[in-house]
Image (spheres, rainbow, N blue to C red):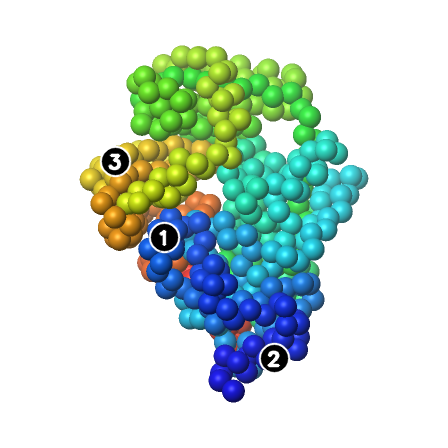
């Protein structure tokens, strides 16, 4: 019996024969996510990240047993759910086991007194949001991948959503979760509503990308969904003016439901209008009517003082209807030689404009279009989202171009002292730069990894580990 067969035999005894699949076609399917580079590799019949076996969990209760088998045989385990990562988090780099948790039955319970929802980590985010909306609630978490991602994936990748200026990122929305460690123990990490008994241990696994444990259930805050909302579109004189507007409203402590600043190139896409010749700002306020009116008035005063002009609501209304549409990128990737990439980074206010200019200039020779917007705002700075669209003569050259794009973008960000990722996580795309990005803090991650996963079985090759 070969090594792989020995492992498969033990997994069959634990999970059942139907749950353990060593067929090549299954392993090929699990070797790709929605990272554009991986998508193009699949089209070119390249499968550099293949597992030896795919195990489909029927229950999270089986996870500890899988980890025990993996530890006994020295086999890595890479957890996978819906495969919506755009940076390669669920792709194995050392073979082993892909642990597919997407089929674990989705269950949830709503606590209307404490305003939380507890859901299995396998719960589709869009399905959960639809269920809550039917009851008059929302999590406030709305990534573009809402209907393609799971609540467990949100924790693993430190995700954030389109309305984060009001609701915050996943780290602000989660109150607790349950995690299975590589050594088999189960830990419940919570703070209700806040706790000061040592460090906030919930933060250890948020953004750990499956390298430290497997999240099995999540408790999130919920909010009233049916609140007055006011949206408006503004044209601005310059991107710099837009950044000043975002900074000023953040320093005043405003919490707009929506704040999205587009440079001219992306504004034409966001507005579906090729004639647009100015940067565009989408704003929105949500809450009790009196608060919405007050916040809207303050925002409008700031915007107009910086040269902004209201264009009404049509532009932002159209975006709200299309905000989950990823077809521009997907259609281009699906065409021979076509490529597209989305890279989100972050920087402080004193560096974001220089970063924007440098990324636009350095990436321009590598794509037909380089688009940019700023959509998650903080007191100290903002995120920046770059979208690249282009065509080359073949999928092989498209793969090379995508690799060149990542090398160039990460080099620019490191030079400018920017954060290499804002909400897509590291994955395979950023792992080569993780140690340089985290600097001396990386030793802390290494020590946590050694303590929680002493056999090193969980998702090796990510986060510079």
Q: Earlier in the sequence, mark 1 or mark 3?
A: 1
Q: How far across and down, in percent of the image, does residue 90 sit?
A: 48, 59
Q: Secondary structure at mark 3?
A: loop
15 with respect to 419 (left or right): right
Residue that appears at 67% across and 69% down:
62
Residue that appears at 67% across and 30% down:
225
Q: Residue 92 occupies which quadrant of the picture?
A: bottom left
Mark 2 surroundings: few (<14), some (14-19) or many (≥20) residues within 10 A: some
Instruction: Decide: is 178 above or below 133.
Output: below
Residue nearest the observer in this picture, 372 or 333 = 333
Residue that appears at 59% across and 73% down:
67
Alpha carbons under labels 1 and 3: distance apart: 21 Å
Q: How far across and down, in percent of the image, does residue 290 sit?
A: 65, 16
Q: Earlier in the sequence, mark 2 or mark 1?
A: 2
Q: Which residue is mark 2?
A: 10
Tag on residue 43?
1
302 with respect to 400 (left or right): right
Do residues under tags 2 and 3 come within 8 Å of each other at their CB atoms?
Answer: no
Mark 3 surroundings: few (<14), some (14-19) or many (≥20) residues within 10 A: some
Alpha carbons under labels 2 and 3: distance apart: 51 Å
Q: How far across and down, in percent of the image, does residue 95 sit?
A: 44, 71
Q: Residue furthest right?
A: 113
Residue that appears at 59% across and 70% down:
20
In which quadrant of the rendered image does the C terminus lie? Answer: bottom left
Q: Which residue is mark 3?
A: 368
Residue nearest the observer in this picture, 458 or 326 = 326
Mark 1 surroundings: few (<14), some (14-19) or many (≥20) residues within 10 A: some
Instruction: Decide: is 349 above or below 151.
Output: above
Residue nearest the observer in this picture, 187 or 125 = 125
Q: Residue 436 occupies which quadrant of the picture?
A: bottom left
């Amino acid at each position: 019996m070969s090594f792989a067969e020995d492992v498969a035999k033990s997994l069959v005894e634990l999970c059942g024969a139907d749950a353990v699949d060593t067929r090549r076609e299954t392993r090929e399917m699990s070797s790709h996510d929605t990272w554009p580079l991986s998508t193009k590799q699949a089209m070119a019949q390249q499968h550099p990240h293949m597992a030896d076996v795919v195990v489909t969990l029927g229950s999270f209760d089986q996870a500890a047993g899988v980890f025990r088998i993996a530890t006994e045989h020295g086999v890595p385990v890479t957890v996978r759910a819906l495969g919506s990562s755009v940076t390669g988090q669920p792709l194995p780099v050392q073979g082993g086991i892909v642990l597919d948790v997407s089929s674990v039955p989705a269950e949830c319970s709503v606590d209307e007194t404490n305003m939380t929802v507890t859901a299995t980590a396998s719960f589709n985010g869009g399905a959960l949001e639809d269920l809550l909306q039917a009851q008059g609630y929302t999590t406030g978490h709305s990534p573009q991948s809402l209907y393609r991602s799971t609540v467990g994936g949100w924790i693993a990748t430190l995700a954030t959503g389109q309305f984060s200026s009001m609701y915050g990122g996943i780290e602000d929305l989660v109150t607790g979760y349950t995690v299975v460690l590589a050594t088999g123990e189960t830990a419940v990490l919570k703070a209700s509503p806040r706790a000061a008994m040592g460090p906030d241990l919930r933060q250890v696994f948020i953004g750990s990308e499956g390298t430290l444990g497997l999240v099995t259930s999540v408790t999130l805050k919920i909010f009233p969904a049916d609140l007055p909302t006011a949206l408006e579109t503004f044209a601005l004189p310059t991107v710099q003016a837009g950044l000043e507007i975002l900074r000023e409203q953040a320093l005043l402590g405003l919490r707009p439901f929506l704040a999205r600043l587009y440079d001219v190139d992306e504004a034409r896409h966001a507005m579906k209008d090729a004639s647009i010749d100015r940067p565009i700002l989408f704003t929105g306020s949500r809450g009790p009517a009196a608060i919405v009116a007050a916040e809207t008035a303050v925002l409008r005063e700031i915007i107009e003082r910086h040269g902004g002009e209201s264009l009404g609501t049509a532009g932002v209304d159209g975006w709200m209807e299309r905000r989950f549409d990823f077809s521009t990128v997907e259609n281009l990737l699906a065409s021979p030689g076509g490529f597209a990439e989305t890279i989100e980074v972050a920087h402080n206010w004193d560096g974001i404009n220089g970063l924007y200019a440098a990324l636009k200039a350095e990436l321009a020779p590598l794509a037909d279009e380089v688009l940019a917007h700023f959509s998650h705002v903080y007191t100290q700075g903002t995120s920046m989202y770059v979208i690249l669209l282009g065509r080359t003569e073949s999928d092989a050259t498209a793969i090379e171009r995508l690799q060149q794009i990542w090398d160039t973008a990460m080099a620019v960000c490191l030079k400018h002292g920017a954060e290499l990722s804002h909400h897509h996580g590291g994955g395979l795309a950023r792992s080569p730069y993780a140690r340089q990005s985290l600097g001396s803090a990386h030793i802390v991650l290494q020590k946590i990894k050694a303590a929680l996963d002493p056999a090193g079985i969980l998702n090796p090759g990510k986060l510079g580990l």
